[in-house]
Each structure stands twice: as structure tokens, then as C-alpha cells.
Image (cartoon, rainbow, N blue to C red):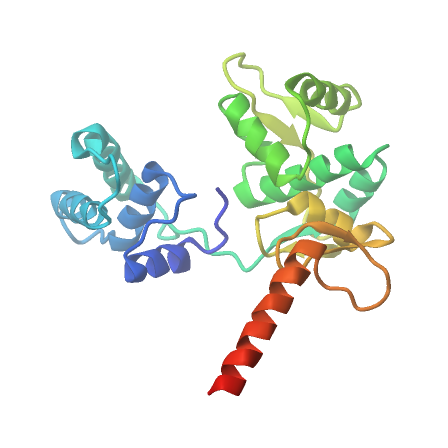
Amino acid sequence: MYILNEKKYIREILVSGNKPDNISNGYLITLIAKYYFNKDKDLDVLIDTVKKKIFEFNIEGYQEYRYANKIKKTCLELYELQSNNIFRELEYVPIYEKELEVVESLPNDRQKKFMFTLFAIARYMNCEGWINKKDSKGISEVFKLANVSLTTDKRNELLYELHSNGYIHFGKKVNNLNIRVDLDDTDDTIVYKVTQFENIGNQYIGNFKKGYKQCKCCGKKIKDTGNKKMYCVKCAGKKHLEADRKYKNKVRN
């Protein structure tokens, strides 16, 4: 999960009192700990606060003893940090001109969407081009974000081709699937700003492939017919029903 503005995100969650389905318990604990962290207060105070706030969400199946070590370790690490910038607070993630040139040099849309997504994640992670994924599940999430649907064999084939041609690099350890891309310096021209970490592959197609655009509602790629089309067929139907319902309510009132 990639959140551009973590502080704003966790504040909204705490105000609503509802845990989003797409956030793990572990990440929620980390964000709560960051939000209530105060280096002038005792460690035990922060630990107790995190436990209390997590409990208030009434998460189905949550058992405090299973996360006790996670909570303690997360809180302790905050006190050990040298920096005061504990939250990731970004307006956008930039894609630079040279990175787009690399993407455009690839032979097919699948590779282009995947590589464009890798650049976006690498910029977000800010770890010298590394995208750290422990297992195949992590890699599957990248393919999903890139809007590339392939079998496991075809995924491996795509990764092999990108690696063989020098576009991506793998870590030396055999117990992870970390990937590194080559990032140019940030003096280059910004050609695109990723403001939402959803459907990044379709963002590439909708903004850089002639004849296509993105559905403003779901992010699906759609053909640009030049008639101010903004939505895919499914979302257009929903928008029509919504507008019709509002009109009827207005007339009724």
C-alpha cells in the first residue's frame, strides 16, 4: 500500500473510527504510533496509546497479544530515529523525462506499464531505486498496480526480459525478490506527477498512448473518441443513474 500523505491519511482514519479494508493491521499500528509519537513522553505512554487506539477500531479477529511485539518494536524505533520527519508527506511522485524515454523504448504495453509503475514505486520508496519485495505476493501487487494481468510463468518471462536487457536489477540475496531500477538525477524535466497510487499502468496508457485516456471514475483505460468521453461504459451508466436519481429527488421535493 502506498500512501502519499501518511499524516493526513491516519488523521482521517482516526476521526472516522473505521479501519479501511485495504490497510494491514501492522501498517495501521505504524501510522498510529507515528501520529501520537512525542519524544518528550515516556515510551510506555506511547505503547499504551497505540494499544488503546487499535482496540477502539474493534477489528474483527484482532488479538492484542499477537501484535504486542510489533507495537513495542515500532514505538521503540521511533525513539531511536535521528530525524523528526517520521511521516511520508508527498504531494506527488514525479516521473522524469529520461525515465519516460526508457519506458517508451520498450516493445509492448505490458512492459511499458510495468516499467512506468516501477519508476513510480522507486521514487516513492526513495531507496536508491530499490523496490523491496519479500516474496511473490509483493511482486503480484506490483503487477496489479501496473494493470498487467499475467500467469506466473508469463510474469517471470517479463521480469527476465527486462533484467536481461538491463532495465531492472535483482538483489544478491536469494530469499527475496527485490528489484532495482536506474533513477536519473532530479534535475531532469518532470513529465508526469503521480498523485494516486492506483491503476498506474492505466495512468501511463491514458496519458501517453495516443488514442487512449483514463476513466475519471475507476481508472480503467478507455479509447479517446474525441467526444469529451470521460467514463467507461460501466461508470457512465452509474453516473447516468445517479444523475437521474438526483433529478427525480429534486422534482419530488
Who's the residue at 68% across and 62% down the image? 236
Who's the residue at 63% across and 29% down the image? 180
73 lies above or below 101: above
Residue 47 falls left or right of residue 114 = left
Say whether residue 129 is visible: no
Who's the residue at 54% across and 21% down the image? 136
Say whether residue 140 is visible: yes
Q: Position of residue 148 (x, y in %)?
A: 69, 34
Which residue is at the far top? 174
Number of marks present in the image shown: 0
Depth check, front residue: 243 or 154: 243
Residue 110 falls left or right of residue 24 = right
Who's the residue at 58% across and 54% down the image? 196
Depth check, front residue: 191 or 232: 232
Q: Position of residue 118 (x, y in %)?
A: 65, 37
Q: Position of residue 121 (x, y in %)?
A: 59, 41
Q: Position of residue 206 (x, y in %)?
A: 76, 53
Q: Could you say which quadrant of the image residue 102 lies in?
A: top right
Residue 186 falls left or right of residue 5 = right
Depth check, front residue: 85 or 25: 25
